[in-house]
Image (tube, grey):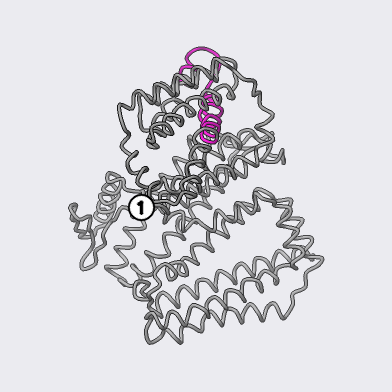
């Protein structure tokens, strides 16, 4: 009985939090008009306005954790039922925090200029500092929350951190998202959909402007669906991490992820069409300020939840015999092959978003790669690491070929030289050492675990057709991500042969280390860091 009461209280509080979020969003979006560009603190204003999307992502992430670790959350409910008391003080503090969050409306009612906004921010921060701990305490005592965090461990903390930075991740990806063909296709399909709905829609392909009656919108590159891709793709990847021991990885990555991204894109087309119709027939302010700002996050979050619910119920996407709790993720080789590579790719996006040029952020990339590899260090040390002279020799040949085929100074060498020239000696040394560690040790390990350890081994099988397919696919993906397609293809073929020769991915790692070490040596001797 007490456990049921605790669960009902948790549902009640979840509904209460959602209602409070909606009320605050409605107040500061429609009743009080705040133009972040006029506040003098654009980034801070935008960060505060992202609270709804961030909260939705957080609730969804917690829901995925509940699915992945049901026994832990059931035990948490039992503990809370025994130790928790619905204290009047916690309830009063929750509503007091909500009231404080409403107070800036009095300041901003006459305008939201820099002075008014500066006065409102401390009050919002005070309200948040009051309502968040009060609500948590209303659910369970601090000792039970501490117990839950200990049980979830580093993976739970990583999941919560990941979902909390999703708005920033989407923002970081946007400058890199400049696929003109996809933007044009989105623009064209929105126009077609509006026409099919019987509207007298108009469109200008030159400026990517379309609309109905007196209301028009501009379909920019980010409107092609990048936020939806990040949100839906992020939750699909999160599910794969948490259920790494049960999902059928081949079917999941080749079927679920592409279909999820496609569904996200289609939903984005529908969202833009509805936005135009709302602006033309209901309210331009509702369309631009409310529907455009919030509907995307709400719709994409609901889509992610629907996709994960379908995936979770599908036996075809899970190994049924593995549904029971299994080994920790740090002892799962599939996770060790995939997660560091994901971190490696994400680190590139972060560096490109935060640094100009992006290469300046390489020490940060090395830190992210180390953090991704360290949890699997014991598992990786158990692999057969006997030195293979043939792999080292072939790798060295690949490195020499890479340098010789460069044909002179690299295009990015001058830019990197100028960047290093503008640094202090200490900063230049840190950057150079980081670049060498990443290039010679971390990148070969991470890439070979993924390309040869995961992709190649998953596709490999009996008979030469399967081996040929495995080598072709793993090498093609490797080459696409390395720019110099011919040289990267030859390198991929060599590394694949090393991995298949004795069935050891560690031989491919050794060959890759040798190749990158030769290239790094060439970069140090010539001063052309663009080689790597």
The residue indicated by pointer 1 is 175
| Magenta-tinted stretch | 442-469
119 and 290: which is toward the camera? 119
Q: Position of residue 329 (x, y in %)?
A: 66, 40
Q: Residues within 10 Å of mark 1 (few under 14, many from 20)?
A: few
Q: Is residue 82 above or below residue 232?
A: below
Q: Which residue: 45% across, 58% down?
A: 299
Main secondary structure found in the magenta portion: helix
Question: Is 459 contained in the magenta span?
Answer: yes
Label 1 element class: helix
Where residue 368 appears, x then y in whole percent?
Answer: 54, 46
Q: Is residue 173 above or below residue 471?
A: below
The x, y position of residue 231, in whole percent, is 47, 52
- 401 in the magenta segment: no
Image quadrant holding the N terminus, namely: bottom right
Residue 391 location (% of width, % of height): 54, 18
* Quarter where residue 128 is shown: bottom right
For the point 49% across and 17% down, the residue is 394
Kindly give the residue lying farthest to the top in the view shown.
463
Viewer-proximal residue among 517 and 456:
517
Using the image as rendered, state which of residue 373 and residue 144 is in the foreground. Answer: 373
| Count of marks overlaid on the render | 1
């Amino acid at each position: 009985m007490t456990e049921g009461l605790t669960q009902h209280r948790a549902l009640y509080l979840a509904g209460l939090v959602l209602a409070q979020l909606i009320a605050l969003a409605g107040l500061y979006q429609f009743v009080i008009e705040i133009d972040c560009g006029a506040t003098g603190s654009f980034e801070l204003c935008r960060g505060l306005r992202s609270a709804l999307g961030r909260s939705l992502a957080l609730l969804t992430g917690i829901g995925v954790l509940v699915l992945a670790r049901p026994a832990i959350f059931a035990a948490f409910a039992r503990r809370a039922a025994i130790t928790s008391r619905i204290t009047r003080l916690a309830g009063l503090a929750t509503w007091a925090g909500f009231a404080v969050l409403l107070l800036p409306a009095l300041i901003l009612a006459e305008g939201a200029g820099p002075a008014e906004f500066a006065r409102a921010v401390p009050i919002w921060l005070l309200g948040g500092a009051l309502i968040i701990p009060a609500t948590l305490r209303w659910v369970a005592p601090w000792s039970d929350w501490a117990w839950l965090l200990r049980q979830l461990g580093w993976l739970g903390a990583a999941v919560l951190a990941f979902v909390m930075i999703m708005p920033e991740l989407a923002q970081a990806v946007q400058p890199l998202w400049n696929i003109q063909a996809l933007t044009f296709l989105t623009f064209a399909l929105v126009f077609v959909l509006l026409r099919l709905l019987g509207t007298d829609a108009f469109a200008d392909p030159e400026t990517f402007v379309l609309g109905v009656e007196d209301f028009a919108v501009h379909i920019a590159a980010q409107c092609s669906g990048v936020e939806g891709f990040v949100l839906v793709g992020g939750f699909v990847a999160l599910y794969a991490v948490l259920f790494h021991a049960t999902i059928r990885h081949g079917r999941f990555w080749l079927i679920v992820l592409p279909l999820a991204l496609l569904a996200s894109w289609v939903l984005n087309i529908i969202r833009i069409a509805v936005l135009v119709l709302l602006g033309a027939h209901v309210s331009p302010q509702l369309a631009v300020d409310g529907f455009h700002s919030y509907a995307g996050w709400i719709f994409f979050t609901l889509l992610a939840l629907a996709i994960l619910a379908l995936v979770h119920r599908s036996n075809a996407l899970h190994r049924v015999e593995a549904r029971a709790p299994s080994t920790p993720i740090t002892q799962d080789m599939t996770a060790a092959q995939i997660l560091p590579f994901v971190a490696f790719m994400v680190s590139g996006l972060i560096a490109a978003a935060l640094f100009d040029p992006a290469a300046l952020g390489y020490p940060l990339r090395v830190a992210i790669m180390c953090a991704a590899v360290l949890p699997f260090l014991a598992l990786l040390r158990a692999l057969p690491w006997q030195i293979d002279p043939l792999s080292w020799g072939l790798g060295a040949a690949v490195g020499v070929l890479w340098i010789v085929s460069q044909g002179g100074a690299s295009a990015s060498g001058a830019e990197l030289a100028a960047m290093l020239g503008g640094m202090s000696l200490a900063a230049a040394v840190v950057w150079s050492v980081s670049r060498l560690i990443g290039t010679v040790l971390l990148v070969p390990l991470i890439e070979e675990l993924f390309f040869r350890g995961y992709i190649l081994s998953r596709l490999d099988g009996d008979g030469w057709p399967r081996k040929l397919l495995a080598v072709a696919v793993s090498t093609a993906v490797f080459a696409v991500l390395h720019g110099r397609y011919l040289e990267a293809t030859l390198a991929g073929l060599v590394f694949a042969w090393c991995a298949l020769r004795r069935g050891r991915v560690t031989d491919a790692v050794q060959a890759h280390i040798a190749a990158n070490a030769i290239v790094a040596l060439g970069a140090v001797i010539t001063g052309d860091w663009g080689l790597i």
